[in-house]
């Protein structure tokens, strides 16, 4: 739950900064932080990385 709050705060702060500073780079911060969070969670799985990614994409079936 703490991660949801943290990513929500990052999103809110980056949107406010993007609107105040009028720079689009701030709007990419939430996407980058969520991608980094997903990558860390995938790396934490005790299987090899390629097997984990293959397993995740086989769940769609």
Image: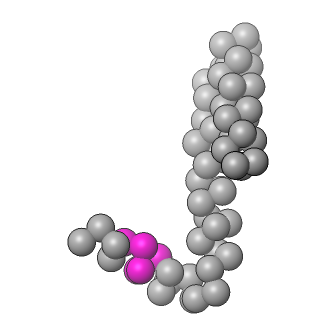
Question: Which residue sits furthest left?
Answer: 61
Q: Specify the farthest residue to the front.
A: 1
Task: Name the residue at 29% across, 67% down.
Answer: 60
Q: What range is drawn magenta here?
A: 53-57
Question: Was residue 29 drawn as part of the magenta stretch in this picture?
Answer: no
Q: Is residue 28 above or below residue 17?
A: below
Q: Quadrant of residue 56?
A: bottom left
22 horizontally vs 61: left or right: right
**Where residue 10 appears, x then y in whole percent?**
72, 35
| Residue at the spot 64% in from the left edge and 87% down from the top edge | 46
Question: Is the magenta region chiefly helix, strand or loop?
Answer: helix
Q: Image quadrant of residue 15?
A: top right
- The colour scheme of the drawn protein is one colour
Residue 61 vs residue 16, the one in the foreground: 61
- Residue sitting nearer the eye, 22 or 29: 29
Where does residue 52 sit, x and y in percent of width and height? 50, 81
Q: Position of residue 38 (x, y in %)?
A: 59, 60
Q: Residue at x 74, y 25 (%)?
A: 13
Q: In which quadrant of the rendered view does residue 14 lie?
A: top right
Position of 53 compared to 28: left or right?
A: left
Quadrant of the drawing holding the C terminus: bottom left
Q: Position of residue 42 (x, y in %)?
A: 59, 71
């Amino acid at each position: 739950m703490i991660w949801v709050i943290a990513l929500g705060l990052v999103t809110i702060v980056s949107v406010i900064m993007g609107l105040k500073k009028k720079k689009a780079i701030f709007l990419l911060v939430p996407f980058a932080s969520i991608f980094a969070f997903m990558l860390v969670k995938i790396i934490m799985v005790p299987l090899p990385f390629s097997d984990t990614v293959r397993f995740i994409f086989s769940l769609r079936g």
